[in-house]
Image (spheres, helix red, strand yellow):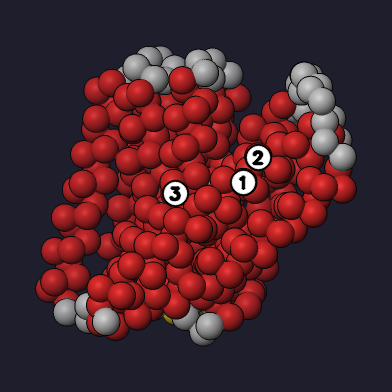
Amino acid sequence: MLLISLILFLISCLVLVVSGGFLVKLIVKIASYLRLSEFVVAFIIMAFSTSIPELFVGISSAISGNPALSLGNVIGSNIADLTLVIGIVALLGNGIKPQNPLIKKDSLFMFLIALVPIALMIFDQTLSRIDGIILTSIFIIYMWHLIKERKEVKGKFIENKREPIAFTIFFFISYLGILFLSAHFVVKYATQLAIELLLPVMAIGLFLVAIGTSLPELVFGTRAVLAKKGDLAVGDAMGSVVCNSTLVLGVTAMISPITNSFFIFLTSAIFMAIVTFLFMIFIRSKKGLSITESVMLIMMYLLFILVEFYFKSKIF
């Protein structure tokens, strides 16, 4: 039974990632058709679309009455994005030195925004529906700020032979449906694995689901650095952290308030805060993400796994 659950979980994750990847391409096509600026696509649409798996896992887990999985998924995904994913991407790109000075300022906003759900959780040990509204509002305000701040940034997509927009929207809706179904099964089989392995559901969200839903960021980041566009990889990672910490948790909490073992949450949250702070410091430095910093970030992820399993073994 354990092996069957694991196989079905991995298949569901694969479908989730593949459908998410197609959605990324379709969103870019729609943006191109509407002649949106390159910035909007790179910093907002790409970050949002690569966070779609986390969002649907959150919605599915909330509907199934298991929102703690989403909390673990978001914390785990944020840590994976800022350590394992960006570390591997930077290594492949022989380091990343941000060219856009606005990225350094945005890294501070990302750090502060990532702390908001932690503060709300510490306040009353739950993310209520009101907290969900607060987080979703922060996401909307921040997106508005980004668009307003860069309204003078120009640059259009090079128009290729565009497919009829109706077909693109049809496929977009179809893959959205596939994504929702695969997210439902990811939640279902992740919960089964947690029960069969006698692990807390949040632990499954922190590792298995988090790595699975972070694959779109890894794919996009790799493509970006190989195309000598490191800023896009960094922007996508930062945008994903903001989306996960505000929109994903906000929508999930509005559907079903999130509660979890406070000690289990606290150890993971403290690690996420440390990782986010280190990433911000590296990005704001003159040399950016060098090979050394990249290796350090990957090592931080390995340390995170060791620390989490140590604490979990002490509790369970």
Which quarter of the image is occupied by the C terminus? bottom left
> Which of the labelled discs sits on residue 25, or is there none?
2
Q: Secondary structure at mark 2?
A: helix
Residue for badge 3: 214
Q: Are marks 1 and 2 in contact (CB under 8 Å)?
A: yes
Amino acid type, mark 3: Ser
Amino acid type, mark 2: Lys
Which quarter of the image is occupied by the N terminus? bottom left
Estimate the x, y position of residue 146 in percent, counting from the top left.
70, 36
User: Dot 3: within a 10 Å radius of its alpha carbon, few (fewer than 14), some, or many (20 or more) residues?
Assistant: many
Q: Earlier in the sequence, mark 1 or mark 3?
A: 1
Q: Residue at x 70, y 28 (%)?
A: 39
Q: Secondary structure at mark 1?
A: helix
- Residue 93 lies in what quarter of the image? top left
Amino acid type, mark 1: Phe
Q: On screen, 29 above or below 64? A: above
As measured in the structure, the alpha-carbon distance from the residue carrying label 2 to the one carrying label 3 is 17 Å
As measured in the structure, the alpha-carbon distance from the residue carrying label 1 to the one carrying label 3 is 15 Å
Residue for badge 1: 22
Q: Residue at x 44, y 49 (%)?
A: 214
Q: Residue at x 66, y 57 (%)?
A: 175
Q: On screen, 16 above or below 152? A: below
User: Dot 2: within a 10 Å radius of its alpha carbon, few (fewer than 14), some, or many (20 or more) residues?
Assistant: some
